[in-house]
Amino acid sequence: HSEEAAMVGDRMDTDIIAGIESGLDPILVLSGVTDREEMNRLMDAILEGGKTGVDFCGYKNIVGAFHQPKAVLIDPDTLRTLPRRQVVNGLFEAIKMGATNDKELFDLFYEGKWEDQLELVIEKALLVKKYVVEQDEKESHLRKILNFGHTIGHGFESAAHGRYLHGECVALGMIPMCSESIKQRVINVLEKCKLYHSIEYDWEKITEAAFHDKKADGDTVSVTTVKEIGKY
């Protein structure tokens, strides 16, 4: 019998079994067990905020809970061993934090400085996430800004059936949520980070997936828009 559960990475983007075996296990099955998380992906390192969620029946994060870990370990040297596609896949989270809350962070990407200052990128993105989660742990108001790009992005991801990674889909989902005055600037950043590309999709399936998203409420879906870099 162990009173601790260690989880490597909090984003289980595959299926419900994988999720229950990691993040949801201590919450749903082993009530009271301590959860320690080691962030082994760039997305994980930036994301940590106490959410655990898994995909179910082809839809994103339908099953999940809020559960804060006792400790979070982030090792930038380990992140640098990842395949290039996985590294840029995680960048969208930091780009999102910059676009919605921190212009200086966004400019690190715009100026092409993110690779030389990866630790700073992670730190600044985490400070945004920390502030938001401390203000609104259960996503009743402020935390909804962290869904920037996710509604359409989750639609892309569900319809793609694994052909594209989470970050690749959500990055594209940000573009329609930007004002015309900043849209090209965001596209430029996504291009520099290799997150801007053309994908084939069925708009009907995207819409259907969006209305199965956790942000849907009846016949409406809440979205976060950005009119000015650094401000939502």
Image (tube, rainbow, N blue to C red):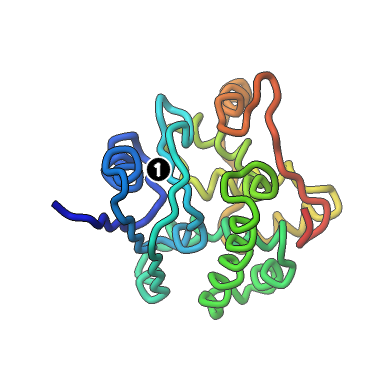
Relative image position of residue 17 (x, y in whole percent):
28, 36
186 displayed left or right of 71: right
Relative image position of residue 169 (x, y in whole percent):
55, 43
Which residue in the structure is indicated by mark 1? Answer: 13
**Residue ranking furthest to the left:** 1
Amino acid at circle 1 = Asp
Number of marks in the rendered image: 1
**Residue ranking furthest to the front:** 32
Q: Residue at x 38, y 76 (%)?
A: 77
Helix, strand or loop at label 1? It is loop
Q: Residue at x 65, y 25 (%)?
A: 217
Q: Quadrant of residue 149?
A: top right
Task: Tell which of 221 and 107 is nearer to you.
Answer: 221
181 displayed left or right of 55: right
Task: Tell which of 57 and 203 is nearer to you.
Answer: 57
Q: Residue at x 51, y 55 (%)?
A: 49
